[in-house]
Image: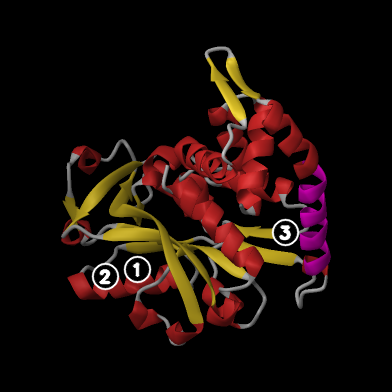
């Protein structure tokens, strides 16, 4: 028996439905059902009657829940007390890249921290900055964003990373641009166009310059912005092109034409290596992995 199984039983007893309980716990229904079956096998008795009208505790299930509620309360109290004594006082500063929003992850993340009140969270979101520098200088605790190419990371050895969502790398254009109808687009086809990117020296700007140099592409003009929303507004109005993941197309209402040769970008969980095994990091990463697998 483990605390996860106990928590699952209490959720099913509350909602009388495996799927609804799984949704509130941010896990899949098969994973929840499997853990409850394992617990019932270990105890040698059914905890729930599964009926067409819903899932209801058996007598053994009622007794289990009665004893489990103070156990969970004590466990959560212990977690809060331990978190308050950690070096960071149970607080997190999380840098959120625009890919978090374009993949509809922000609301689930906010809901996660609403149920983990032992952690005070500050979101630093949707600004074009060198977030890895902020991580290295302890101005951020973790980042959810694209991991830049290794050639542009001087201190790569400092960071732990875990890819969450892998997306096709695309050219982002106004929907009125004739090339928006192409199935794929080579970077060389953008030669002489205006580019829209981050401020001079930002990671987005450095990545764009590296790609342009690699493919031998020159630009007519560069528009520089400090937010992804402003960049996408300029793309929508036809001022130029930008590069980004496929999910930007739907989220920002622009055309996202896959680049050739075929390349991919990942939304990644990034933190300092020495912090990757902290309980609050492990728990949050488990949640994100489960959420993104959907």
Q: Are marks 3 and 2 in contact (CB under 8 Å)?
A: no
x and y percentages locating residue 147 in the rendered image: 42, 69
Considering depth in this image, is 191 or 131 the residue closer to the camera?
A: 131
Q: Name the residue under label 3.
A: 121
Q: Residue 30 carries which label?
A: none
**Residue 78 forms part of the magenta stretch:** yes
Quadrant position of residue 40: top right
Q: Mark 2 points at which residue?
A: 212
Q: Do the residues labelled 2 and 1 touch (CB within 8 Å)?
A: yes
Q: Distance between the residues labelled 3 and 2?
A: 38 Å
Most prominent secondary structure in the magenta stretch?
helix
x and y percentages locating residue 140 in the rendered image: 64, 72
x and y percentages locating residue 71 in the rendered image: 78, 50
Q: Do the residues labelled 1 and 3 touch (CB within 8 Å)?
A: no
Q: Name the mark nearer the viewer: 3 or 2.
A: 3
Q: Give the range drawn in magenta.
A: 69-82
Considering depth in this image, is 228 or 60 the residue closer to the camera?
A: 60
Q: Mark 1 points at which residue?
A: 208
What residue is at 45 percent from the left and 41 percent from the top? 252
């Amino acid at each position: 028996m483990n605390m996860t199984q106990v928590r699952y039983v209490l959720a099913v007893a509350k909602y009388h439905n495996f799927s609804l309980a799984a949704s509130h716990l941010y896990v899949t229904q098969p994973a929840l059902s499997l853990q409850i079956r394992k617990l019932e096998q270990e105890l040698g008795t059914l905890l729930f009657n599964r009926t067409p009208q819903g899932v209801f505790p058996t007598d053994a299930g009622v007794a289990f829940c009665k004893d489990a509620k103070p156990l969970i309360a004590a466990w959560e109290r212990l977690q809060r007390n331990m978190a308050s004594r950690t070096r960071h006082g149970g607080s997190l500063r999380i840098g959120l890249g625009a890919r978090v929003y374009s993949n509809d992850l922000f609301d689930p993340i906010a809901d996660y921290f609403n149920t983990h009140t032992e952690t005070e969270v500050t979101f630093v979101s949707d600004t074009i900055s060198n977030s890895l520098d902020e991580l290295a200088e302890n101005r951020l605790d973790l980042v959810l964003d694209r991991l830049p190419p290794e050639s542009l990371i001087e201190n790569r050895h400092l960071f732990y990373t875990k890819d969450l969502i892998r997306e096709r790398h695309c050219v982002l254009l106004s929907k009125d641009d004739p090339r928006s109808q192409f199935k794929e687009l080579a970077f060389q086809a953008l030669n002489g166009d205006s580019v829209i990117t981050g401020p001079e020296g930002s990671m987005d700007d450095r990545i764009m310059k590296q790609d342009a140099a690699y493919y031998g592409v020159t630009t007519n003009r560069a528009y520089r912005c400090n937010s992804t929303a402003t960049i996408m507004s300029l793309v929508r109005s036809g001022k130029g092109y930008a590069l980004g993941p496929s999910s930007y197309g739907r989220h920002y209402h622009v055309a996202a034409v896959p680049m050739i040769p075929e390349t991919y970008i990942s939304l990644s969980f990034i933190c300092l290596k020495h912090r990757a095994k902290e309980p609050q990091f492990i728990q949050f990463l488990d949640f994100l992995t489960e959420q993104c697998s959907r």
